[in-house]
Image (cartoon, rainbow, N blue to C red):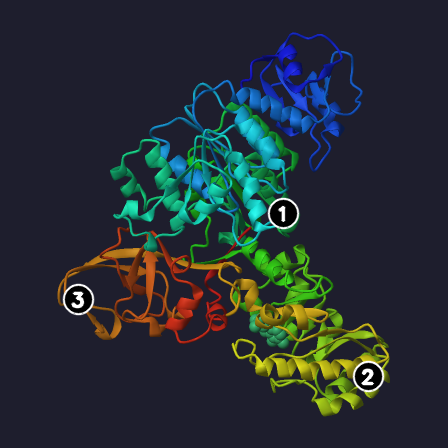
């Protein structure tokens, strides 16, 4: 930051009152004491965000700051200049506005509810050779973030790209006033609008206020009428203008089109853009967590070095993993001195076991020798630390599944929005959470506040307890010899026969236990487990006579919820209602939860038959047949890598059984995945395919146990390249169809040896 303002100018800009006369220059604004490094010419703004900045005034003073902008009474030694304003955030924004107005180069602003960061990064990729761009870091798009981004503008730049987002009506007025964009990019509002807005229309209009004075705003055809309604000067991007590009083969086609269109407007050669269109880097600008070599836990956040993201990564590392040794690895190659100091200050305040500051990806041997620790990697996108992180991946096998935890949370909230407010959420985490891994997802579910977990068998529940899960856990299928563990680990068994109830109570009596929580399974038409309607009256009489147990819930399971014909499901719900009223009438304990819906059931009947709880499973991972398009997000990507590329001459055969014979010269790649991983043999010879660098590559020959060969003649690829098995191009539904099965089976048949990566 290089503001070059006198105190008098600053006071004037923020309409403040100062306690003394001071003619020093101000160059840098701080709002977080941990970022304070050079104190000369610095001013501290006491913002009221998550924490009240006024409580940190003394700390800033101790660090050497002598000028302050505040909105409350504060006490400081005499040599401090205190500038009082009504609202410190607005004051900061006024300074940002003043600073922005010093520059006449274009300011391009991006808003909408989706894809802003992707478009910003893509524009940067397309324009960086021609422009000196200042852009907002990561998704620094809030009221404070936008101001801070603007304050970084300088004479060294000739284009600013600023991302902006809002969560309340009228916020955009302040942002518009400070940014005054000359150009706009509008990405649209998704199906969901934030709670704070009346409707999708209102939400869109609020966003579009950003562009009311912009010369031109770029958007897609789909949003044309929205823009017209809001009287925005619009320039529409058309797919037809880019005939050389097969958008259907590429991810995020809309964002890609918008980025290309804007870059063309800004003078980049169309030929160049046609080439670059398929190279746009799909940045996973998200933190990844996975098991590495030598029992290390790897936290890879090597895509940026924003302070906010750094903070989040550190607090994740230091709060939620049981490994005691906390190692932090920073690559600060492209970071300026002041920022370096701030970053080091923050990291050191966490007291890591060891801190490595490396440059240009040079890895010290000492770091490679680390075992049983959690290791956090942070570096800027340019420092390419991601290559270093590869060294720490489990070398055993280079096939992995990624789970997007944010998408999982989104899906759960989507189901919850269909339910009456008091209805609780149980998430089924049987079969290692549908094959996603033992405890990571349950931990996450606990964090985001689901009410209950459910497992199929006792040992699944035991594993959860041994790994720190404290939520109540319902066990569906309890064997008599598991009672010991049920009691020891405080699991809650479902009981489905009179004999079983007797046996369990007998066991509880031995230990003198009373009121042990249990669940009752009732049969409404699945014909799997449970008491039949004719048993219910006797069952209630029995339950009333047993002090050892306390019924926490009564539930049943739907057999045909996926069917578009809902008759059978409605019959099951009716039968359940009858049993429910029997329990309500005669069971002494009135504190009982009733539940029958699974994911599909919730999607269809959440509003009317949610009762006290629903049991979500597959829907959490993104599928039900009835959810509206876009409503649930995909959560899983399965990937592998290429081990070798070969040229095959006409007449040669490939693999076991020689089932494929080359009729022309082709290139093939051998992939590190086979049927032992769950990439089944029935995918041999063109039934299956994978995507490499955006190109579809069919399987050639038979799938082997640990390897698979694909035709890569059309794909531009090399050994080590990433391969999509399931992901943006091949959905899990499509993959399941090729195997003539359902997503449940695909998810649970990805072998344990395939490593699991969780994106936070
Ligand atoms: C697996 C299971 C669920 C969840 O079913 P989905 O179809 O995956 O939503 C709910 N209840 C019971 C009893 C289950 O076994």
Structural distance between the alpha carbons of marks 2 and 1: 49 Å
| Residue at (78, 25) in percent of width and height | 72
* Residue 397 visible here: no
Q: Report the residue marked by disc 3.
A: 662
Disc sitting over residue 543 in the figure: 2
Disc nearer the start of the sequence (2/3): 2
Q: Please provide percent x and percent y for residue 560.
A: 55, 80
Say whether marks 1 and 3 touch (CB < 8 Å): no
Disc sitting over residue 294 in the figure: none
Observer-nearest residue: 449 or 676? 449
* Circle 1 Cα neighbour tier, 10 Å, few/some/many (<14 / 14–19 / ≥20): some
Q: Please provide percent x and percent y for residue 630.
A: 50, 58
Say whether marks 2 and 3 touch (CB < 8 Å): no
Disc nearer the start of the sequence (1/3): 1
Q: Residue furthest bottom?
A: 534
Q: Report the residue marked by disc 1.
A: 197
């Amino acid at each position: 930051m290089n503001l070059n303002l006198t105190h008098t100018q600053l006071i004037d800009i923020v309409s403040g009152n100062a306690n003394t006369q001071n003619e020093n220059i101000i160059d840098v604004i701080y709002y977080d004491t941990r970022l304070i490094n050079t104190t000369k010419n610095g001013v501290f703004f006491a913002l009221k965000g998550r924490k009240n900045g006024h409580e940190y005034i003394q700390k800033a003073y101790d660090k050497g700051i002598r000028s302050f902008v505040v909105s409350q009474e504060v006490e400081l030694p005499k040599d401090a200049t205190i500038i009082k304003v009504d609202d410190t955030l607005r004051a900061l924004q006024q300074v940002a506005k003043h600073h922005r107005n010093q520059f006449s180069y274009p300011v391009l602003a991006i808003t909408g509810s989706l894809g802003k960061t992707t478009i910003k990064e893509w524009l940067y990729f397309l324009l960086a050779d021609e422009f000196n761009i200042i852009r907002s870091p990561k998704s620094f798009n809030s009221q404070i973030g936008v101001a801070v981004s603007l304050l970084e503008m300088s004479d060294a730049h000739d284009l600013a790209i600023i991302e902006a987002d809002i969560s309340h009506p009228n916020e955009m007025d302040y942002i518009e006033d400070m940014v005054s964009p000359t150009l706009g990019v509008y990405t649209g509002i998704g199906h969901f609008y934030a709670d704070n807005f009346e409707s999708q229309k209102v939400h869109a209009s609020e966003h579009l206020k950003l562009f009311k004075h912009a010369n031109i705003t770029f958007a897609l055809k789909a949003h044309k009428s929205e823009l017209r309604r809001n009287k925005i000067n619009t320039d529409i991007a058309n797919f037809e203008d880019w005939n050389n590009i097969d958008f259907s083969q590429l991810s995020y086609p809309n964002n890609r089109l918008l980025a290309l269109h804007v870059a063309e407007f800004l003078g980049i050669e169309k030929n160049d853009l046609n080439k670059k269109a398929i190279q746009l880097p799909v940045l996973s600008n998200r933190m990844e967590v996975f098991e590495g070599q030598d029992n290390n836990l790897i936290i890879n956040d090597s895509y940026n070095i924003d302070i906010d993201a750094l903070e989040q990564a550190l607090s994740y590392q230091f709060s939620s993993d049981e490994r005691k040794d906390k190692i932090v690895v920073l690559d600060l190659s492209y970071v300026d001195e002041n920022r370096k100091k701030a970053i080091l200050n923050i990291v050191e305040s966490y007291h890591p076991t060891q801190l490595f500051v490396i440059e240009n990806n040079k890895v010290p041997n000492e770091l490679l020798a680390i075992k049983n620790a959690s290791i956090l990697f942070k570096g800027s996108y340019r420092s390419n630390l991601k290559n270093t992180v590869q060294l720490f991946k489990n070398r055993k096998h280079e096939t992995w599944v990624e789970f997007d935890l944010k998408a999982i949370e989104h899906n759960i909230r989507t189901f919850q929005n269909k339910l009456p407010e008091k209805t609780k959420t149980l998430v089924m985490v049987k079969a290692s959470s549908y094959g996603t891994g033992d405890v990571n997802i349950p931990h996450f579910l606990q964090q985001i506040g689901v009410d209950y977990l459910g497992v199929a068998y006792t040992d699944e529940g035991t594993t959860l307890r041994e790994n720190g899960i404290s939520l109540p856990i319902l066990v569906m299928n309890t064997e008599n010899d598991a009672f010991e563990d049920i009691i020891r680990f405080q699991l809650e068994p479902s009981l489905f026969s009179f004999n079983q109830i007797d046996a369990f109570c007998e066991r509880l009596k031995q230990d003198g236990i009373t009121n042990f929580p249990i669940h009752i399974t009732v049969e409404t038409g699945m014909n799997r487990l449970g008491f039949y309607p004719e048993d219910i009256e006797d069952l209630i009489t029995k339950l009333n006579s047993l002090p050892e147990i306390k019924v926490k819930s009564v539930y049943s399971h739907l057999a045909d919820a996926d069917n578009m014909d809902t008759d059978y499901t409605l019959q099951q719900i009716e039968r359940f209602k009858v049993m429910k009223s029997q329990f309500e009438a005669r069971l002494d304990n009135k504190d009982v939860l009733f539940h029958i819906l699974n994911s599909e059931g919730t999607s269809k009947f959440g509003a009317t038959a949610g009762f006290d709880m629903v049991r979500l499973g597959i829907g959490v991972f993104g599928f039900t047949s009835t959810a509206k398009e876009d409503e649930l997000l995909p959560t899983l990507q399965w990937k592998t890598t290429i081990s070798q590329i070969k040229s095959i001459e006409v007449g040669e055969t490939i693999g076991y059984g020689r089932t494929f014979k080359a009729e022309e010269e082709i290139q093939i790649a051998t992939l590190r995945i086979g049927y032992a991983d769950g990439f089944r043999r029935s995918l041999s010879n063109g039934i299956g395919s994978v995507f490499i660098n955006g190109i579809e590559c069919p399987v050639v020959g038979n799938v082997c146990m640990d390897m698979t060969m694909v035709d890569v003649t059309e794909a531009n690829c090399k050994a080590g390249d990433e391969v999509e098995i399931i992901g943006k191009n091949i959905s899990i539904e499509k993959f399941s169809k090729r195997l003539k099965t359902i997503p449940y089976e695909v998810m649970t048949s990805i072998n344990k040896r395939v490593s699991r990566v969780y994106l936070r």
